[in-house]
Image (tube, rainbow, N blue to C red):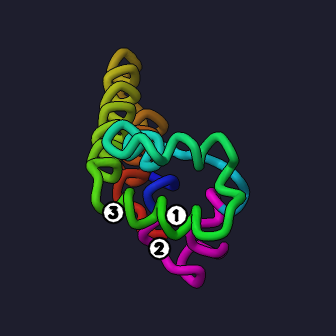
Amino acid sequence: VDDMLDFTGSAESLGKPALSDMQQGLATAPTLFAADQFPQIREMITRRFAEEGDVATVSELVAQSDGMRLSAELATSHAQKAADALGVLPPSEARDALLHLCFMVLNRSA
């Protein structure tokens, strides 16, 4: 979810500049998924988005791709697996808090 917020959030809401992952040379889930649709992204990943315009170009391509949707689906799948794993624990406040956390993470906006 943090990977998606880097594309959709503002510096104010994130507490860091938007697109900061790419500015640090990091390729996150939305970018990696977008690279499946737009292979030219792979070259920019390899050079760690170091050339002028790389970050802006990849940001636009991510917006045109299924990268955000696939990232959301991946996050949902992991949250569901975590919730399923918690199902073996006896009912308790701690288990309920962890279950709540699984789905709270999916809905965060900052």
Task: Give the CA distance from mark 1 to mark 2.
Answer: 6 Å
Name the residue carrying label 2: 9
- Tag 2 secondary structure: loop
Q: Any magenta on residue 108?
A: no
Q: How many marks?
A: 3
Measuring from the top left, give residue 30's x and y in whole percent: 42, 49
Image x and y of residue 68, in percent: 33, 53
Magenta residue span: 7-22
Within 10 Å of disc 3 (Cα), the crowding (few <14, some 14-19, many 20+) is: some
Left or right: 91, with 24 as reference point: left
| Quadrant position of residue 49 | bottom right
Q: Looking at the picture, which amino acid does disc 2 mark?
A: Gly
Please give the name of the residue rendered at 31% of the width and 42% of the height, measured from the top-left corner: 37
The image quarter containing residue 98 is top left
Contact check, label 1 and label 2, Cβ < 8 Å: yes
Identify the disc placed on residue 63.
Answer: 3
Helix, strand or loop at label 1? It is helix
Rounded to the nearest angstrom, the CA distance separating label 3 from label 2 is 13 Å
- Residue at which label 1 appears: 6
Can residue 61 be seen in the rendering of this structure? yes
